Amino acid sequence: MKRLKKKFLIGALLLLTSGFLVCIEGCAGEVLAQTASGVAMGTYVNQTIYTRDEALTGEVEELLLHLEEDMLSWRIAGSEIARINEAAGEECSISDELKQDLISLLEVSERSNGAFDCTLGTLIRLWNMDAWSRAEEEGFIPPTKEEITEALIDAGYDKIKITGDTIYLPSGIQLDLGAAGKGIACDRVAAFLAGKQVSGAVISVGGSVVTYGAKPDGSPWRVAVVDPLNPSSRLGILTLSGEWYISTSGGYERFVEADGIRYHHILDPATGYPADSGLAGVTIICHSGLLSDALSTACFVLGVEDGLALAESYGAQALFVTTDGQLYMTSGMEELFSSTSKP
Ligand code: AMP
Ligand code: MG
């Protein structure tokens, strides 16, 4: 068997911030840039918060850990998603918070003709994505066509029923919110910061970023977009003022190779195989973390033409990079994005 390669690149967006506890002057008193880097929700979290409250970055980390443990992770027994999955075949109670998120996600599924589908849990387990980081040592054998066809029977956003405060998943259906959880996390972080003495913040949770408020010097936020064809370089910079949510999806973020074929982590629910829409990466900017994350995944599956239409229908800005290096973007994105290669 050929030597297998594993690559797991986290952090599609690099924040152009640095330093620890930077003192900014020129305001009433001093505003401190509190910075912290850590791991939560299975990915890297980078925080820069302009505040005098030194405890805030720790509180944001706590919030993310709770969100993962109590609600979003299918892996953690006792989380709401794990509990709903466990109850498949029977009705199960659902919190209002998760219900609202799921309703928004089901709408993305409908409007993307199923390109985004948070009921792919069984198919995703079949692809054994959690083991991809170890596949180099252990070898990776892709699932067979028959196995994929069978797993697709246990998928379908239209099979979920939400009534009042209960949810029903038919037996075999398993939720996986991997394509929206980091964006949802950004929404929760911004809501948390709104109740605190914070003048501005920029926080990344893996490939999702939230910019909040303003920097003390009034300059805009600058968020780098990774070049999906060369992930160690930047494709360009997004210049943003105020509260925005930015998410990137790309085949380069997580993949495994077997016998010379590369399999990445964004699946096309129509085939059960990694999406093959001619895209290397998609970046979405909008006013909701949940939507930016779900739309970036949906657009990656849909490809340029249908993806642009979907993003525009949501009033979101989108940037598409094709596997042959072409860039396509919405007109609003043209104003926010400047390419690194431009003079
Ligand atoms: P993202 O990086 O946000 O595009 O999300 C990719 C993750 O979402 C994968 O690791 C899977 O857990 C899950 N996923 C893969 N394909 C889809 C899809 N078509 N719709 C919804 N979730 C997906
Ligand atoms: Mg996503």
Image (spheres, grey):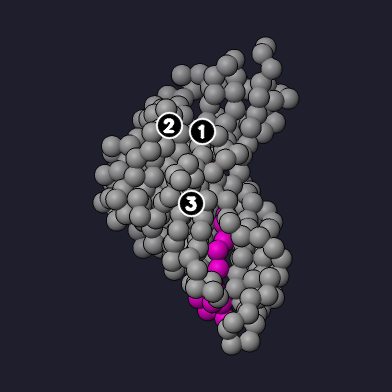
Mark 3, other Cα within 10 Å: few <14 / some 14–19 / many ≥20:
many
User: Horizontal placement of 39 versus 162: left or right?
Assistant: right
In percent of width and height, residue 57 lies at 66, 68
Look at 69% across and 63% down and name the residue there. 19
Is the residue 124 above or below the residue 145 in the image? below
Label 3 to label 1, Cα distance in Å?
Answer: 16 Å
Q: Secondary structure at mark 1?
A: loop
Q: Among all residues in the image, which is located at the extreme front? A: 343
Residue 272 position by quadrant: top left
Residue at image x 54%, y 44%?
234
Q: CA distance from mark 3 to mark 2?
A: 17 Å
Nearer-N-terminus badge (3/1): 1
Instruction: Look at the numbered discs 3 and 2 and tell me whether their residues touch, using CB distance below 8 Å.
Output: no
Q: Is residue 214 above or below residue 118?
A: below
Numbered mark located on residue 237 in the image: 3
Secondary structure at badge 3 equals: strand
Q: Residue flagged by tag 2: what amino acid is it?
A: Gly
Q: Is residue 3 above or below residue 66?
A: above
Q: Which residue is mark 2?
A: 325
Q: Secondary structure at mark 2?
A: loop
Instruction: Tell whether label 2 touches label 1 (CB within 8 Å).
Output: yes
Circle 1 sits on which residue? 229
Q: Residue 197 in magenta?
A: yes
Closest to the observer, 80 or 249 = 249
Question: At x 63% / y 87%, what residue is drawn?
Answer: 29
